[in-house]
Image: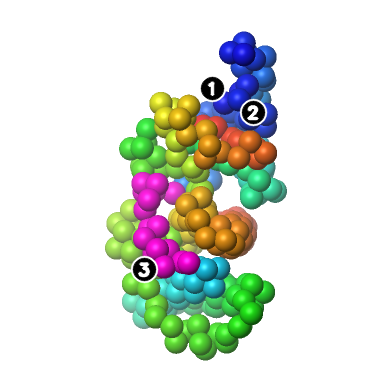
Amino acid sequence: MLSGKGFNKLYNMSGGIKGWQSEVAIGDADRGLELFDGALTTEDALIIGFGLETGLRDFYLSMIETVTSEEAKKMFTMLADIEILHQDRIVELYTEVSEKPISKEEFLAKEVLPAMEGGLSVEEYTSRFQPDMENEIDILSLALSIEAQALDLYSRAAQNATKPGVAEIFLTIASEERTHINHLTDYISRIS
Amino acid sequence: MKWKQFFTPVKSISSSEAKGMVEQDGDDVILLDVRQPQEYEAAHLPGALLIPLGELDERLDELDPDKSIIVY
């Protein structure tokens, strides 16, 4: 249907989604987009993104207190520390696009959304994957799924963005999420 | 004009090739999910755009013809 209508770079993925060997996302096409309702500017989008990274870091920090094995505590500590790097990257992006850069402390002082990265709640993630929170691979797989969900959310937010520059910043964050997925995938390969 | 579609090749690629394209040039690649909404909701490729096959003809303006489009 698309061929012959100006779409010349068309590819059919053989095997469809069943052949896809990587992480998938769930939820309808509008899932989580309400988080970005207030994203009128690129700065707004980044502040919201920062809040979602913070939500995920808070989740990992809370899990350090919940799990009992030392290995699991170390894993959640590592994941929480990684989120600091992700937060820093968002602050960097903000500095690049804004005429009035703000510090990380100012970012942290802003209201944190009642959701974490990817737009699903902790309960939704855990009920979907039912991870053994004491098992390192399960923990990493959960983290991987959250990053995949985040990639999906930012990509869909870019598709829906109408304000100047906002789609581009969502695509930039989505690209960052893709990098996070690759890092986690490499790490899982190394330890499993 | 309708004959043109029969002469425009659509290349089949594997899922690993699709993944490689997205990783290499993500901003210029559209993952187009043409299944039904309930199938998309159950699982979809991260970042995929949902346009069910039955709506595709009316929603072509949502697709950028300059980008690579991977359909599944």
Q: Is residue A139 visible?
A: no
Q: Nearer the viewer, residue A40 or A120?
A: A40
According to the picture, the residue beneath numbered tag 1 turns out to be: A1
Q: Is B15 displayed left or right of A80 in the figure?
A: right
Mark whose residue sits in front, 1 or 2: 2
Contact? badges 1 and 2 (CB < 8 Å) = no
* SS of the residue under disc 2: loop
- Could you tell me which residue is drawn at 51 percent across and 50 percent down? A159
Point out the residue furthest to the top here.
Answer: B3
Q: Position of residue A158 (x, y in %)?
A: 52, 54
Q: Chain of mark 1?
A: A
Q: Quadrant of the N terminus of chain B?
A: top right
Mark whose residue sits in front, 3 or 2: 2
Contact? badges 1 and 3 (CB < 8 Å) = no
Disc number for residue A6: 2
According to the picture, the residue beneath numbered tag 3 turns out to be: A115
Q: Position of residue B24 (x, y in %)?
A: 70, 48
* SS of the residue under disc 3: loop
Q: Is residue B67 visible?
A: yes
Mark 1: amino acid: Met
Q: Chain of mark 2?
A: A
* SS of the residue under disc 1: loop
Mark 2: amino acid: Gly
Residue bounds of the magenta highlight: A25-40
First reached walking from the N terminus: tag 1 or tag 2: 1
First reached walking from the N terminus: tag 1 or tag 3: 1
Q: State how far apart marks 1 and 3 are (Cα).
A: 39 Å
Crowding at mark 3 (Cα within 10 Å: few <14, some 14-19, many 20+): some
Disc number for residue A126: none
Q: Chain of mark 3?
A: A
